[in-house]
């Protein structure tokens, strides 16, 4: 079953996701960090540490959004060229301004592009990352295959994504928060009720854990790994071309 942000719209998932993020871009950072109590920053640092292990010189951040992941990569890796792409121009506008304030706009370039059809040649990047964006791909295997195309041989993909906790207590608390509190808070702050209803639904339908690792393998990734975070609330996946 394909989950889309706006059930009453006849637009494609890709078009709906773009529209959703354009709508919530002004309040996205406020909601994202406050509703996770800042723990998402810890997860990002762990994922970037894995991406940096092979000392990449040029790095691609896919579904870059407002640029948190991309900017942190500029600070915590030795990459000399970092490109962040996203389908939402409004999110990228926020990212560009944040990079400028951080005085990293000479190191980071943001482009509007679709993860399923990227404007890069084969074998371009040493590493690629996706932070909380794979579940929004219109076609996950197609997106992973496209990323593999632009990676150099030996290049590494690192994915950070939400999942469903295995611990019953954590699962219960997280489930209540995610399905009851988050949509209400998101509606109040962002004025888009569908966006924060879609978020937990997209996580529920995401093939997390070993299922996602198997998809990576099927798409051609080697040396695949999985690292659970915070009792399974999130996970880091990585593999190489």
Image: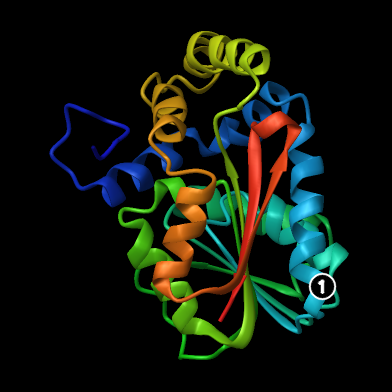
Mark 1 secondary-structure assignment: helix
Q: Which residue is mark 1?
A: 53
Q: Is residue 108 left or right of residue 78?
A: left
Q: Residues within 10 Å of mark 1 (few under 14, many from 20)?
A: few
Percent position of residue 142, x then y: 33, 66
Percent position of residue 113, x then y: 42, 67
Q: Nearer the viewer, residue 196 or 135?
A: 135
Percent position of residue 8, x then y: 17, 27
Task: Point out the image quarter for the N terminus.
Answer: top left
Q: Nearer the viewer, residue 174 or 169?
A: 169
| Residue 115 appears anywhere in the view | no
Percent position of residue 196, x then y: 46, 24
Give the image quarter of residue 117. Answer: bottom left
Give the image quarter of residue 149. Answer: bottom left
Task: Point out the image quarter for the C terminus.
Answer: bottom right
Q: Is residue 136 above or below residue 166?
A: below
Residue in view at x 63 percent, y 82 percent: 155
Q: How is the image coloured?
A: rainbow
Which residue is situated farthest in the left direction here? 10
Residue in view at x 41 percent, y 28 percent: 195
Q: Is residue 104 above or below residue 189?
A: below
Residue in view at x 41 percent, y 23 percent: 192
Q: Is residue 14 left or right of residue 66?
A: left
Residue in view at x 75 percent, y 49 percent: 44
Q: Is residue 70 left or right of residue 215?
A: right
| Residue 140 appears anywhere in the view | yes
Q: Is residue 28 above or below residue 14?
A: above
Q: Is residue 177 left or right of residue 3?
A: right
């Amino acid at each position: 079953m394909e989950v889309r942000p706006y059930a009453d719209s006849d637009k494609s998932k890709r078009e709906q996701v773009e529209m959703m993020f354009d709508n919530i871009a002004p309040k996205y950072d406020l909601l994202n960090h406050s509703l996770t109590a800042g723990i998402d920053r810890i997860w990002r640092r762990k994922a970037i540490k894995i991406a940096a292990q092979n000392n990449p010189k040029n790095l691609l951040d896919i579904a870059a959004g407002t640029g948190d992941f991309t900017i942190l990569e500029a600070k915590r890796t030795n990459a000399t060229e970092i490109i962040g792409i996203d389908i939402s121009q409004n999110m990228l506008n926020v990212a560009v301004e944040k990079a400028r304030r951080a005085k990293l706009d000479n190191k980071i370039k943001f482009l509007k592009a679709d993860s399923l059809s990227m404007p890069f040649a084969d074998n371009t990047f040493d590493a690629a990352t996706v932070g909380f964006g794979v579940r929004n791909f219109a076609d996950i295997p197609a997106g992973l295959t496209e990323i593999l195309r632009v990676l150099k041989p030996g290049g590494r993909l690192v994915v950070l994504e939400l999942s469903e906790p295995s611990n019953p207590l954590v699962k219960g608390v997280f489930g209540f928060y995610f399905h009851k509190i988050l949509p209400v808070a998101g509606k109040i702050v962002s004025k888009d009720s569908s966006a924060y209803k879609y978020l937990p639904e997209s996580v529920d339908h995401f093939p997390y854990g070993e299922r996602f690792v198997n998809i990576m393998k099927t798409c051609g990734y080697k040396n695949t790994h999985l690292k659970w975070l915070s009792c399974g609330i999130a996970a880091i996946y990585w593999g190489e071309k």
